Structure formats: structure tokens, C-alpha cells
Image: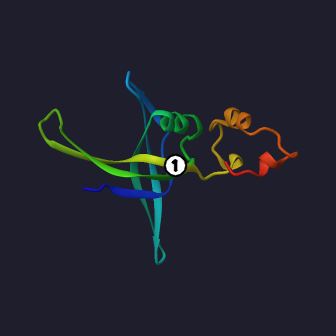
Amino acid sequence: MSALKVYGIVRLTRDPEMKANDEKTIVKFSGAANEKYKDVEKSHFYNFCAFGKQGEIVMQYFKKGSRIFINGELKMSKWQDKEGKSQTTYEVVIDSFEFVDKKSDAPAGAGESEANSLFPEINGNLKEEMAF
């Protein structure tokens, strides 16, 4: 059985949260995507999960308000709550992602000092023109 693939651009609706254990790093966040049909615009909200190094990068460079292009798989989890009721949640497990915002468009504090160190000076101000 193949998984449902999901891809698109979303805007983070809260800062990512890291949950580390002995085995791997897990970063969870939520995001919204807009849909426009005729003159009506709707927002749809989704939960995301990134593991390992990808999760660490999301944690470092993305904050509430950042846009991210994600490619992942929709996963469903079922469990029983404290009252014995069945609960179901869906989240997108990220396979890969890309930066959408330019460095200057990113929300304040979104890994700014780290981002500056990633781009060495090349031919003057070329790093300022690079999308981040």
C-alpha cells in the first residue's frame, strides 16, 4: 500500500517544538495553506513532523510566520484517550523541504545570525541576492 504524498507551501502558525529522545530528534509544528475558489478564500490547517537533521534545521531556521515548501506523506495515528474514547490525528511526515522566504522576508529572529554565516562573501553583494 502506498502512502498519500503531500506537497505545497504552508506558513507556520506556531514556532516548531523539539522533542528529543535517545534515538532521534523529532520536531513538530503546524502550518496553514490558503485555497481560493471564485472570490472565497479559505485557510486549511495541518500538523507536520520532521525527524533527525531535517528537524534540527526546521527548528533552527523556521519560526511562526515563516513559509516552507514541504514534500511528505500523510500519516494517521489512532489511540484511546483517558476517557476511553477513540482519537484520530493526521500529520504530514516531512520527506524533504525547501526555504521559500528570502532572508529579508523571514520573521525577525528566524536563525538570522546562523544564516549569515552560511553564505560567504562572493563577488560583493551576491549573497544578498540569493533566496533563502
Q: Residue at x 45, y 57 (%)?
A: 7
Q: Residues within 10 Å of mark 1 (few under 14, many from 20)?
A: some
Q: Amino acid at mark 1?
A: Phe
Q: Residue at x 40, y 28 (%)?
A: 24
- Give the x, y percent position of residue 51: 43, 36
Q: Quadrant of residue 1?
A: bottom left
Say which element carries label 1: strand
Q: Quadrant of residue 48?
A: top left
24 shown above or below 63: above
| Left or right placement of residue 42 versus residue 84 in this view | right
In the displayed image of the protein, which residue is found farthest to the right?
A: 124
- In the image, 127 versus 10, the foreground residue is 127
User: Tell me, what colour scheme is on the image?
Assistant: rainbow
Identify residue for label 1.
97
- Give the x, y percent position of residue 40: 45, 72
| Left or right placement of residue 41 versus residue 67 in this view | left
- Give the x, y percent position of residue 107: 63, 44
In the displayed image of the protein, which residue is found farthest to the front?
A: 1
In the displayed image of the protein, which residue is found farthest to the top?
A: 22
Q: Residue at x 19, y 39 (%)?
A: 79
Q: Residue at x 49, y 48 (%)?
A: 96
- In the image, 37 versus 52, the foreground residue is 52
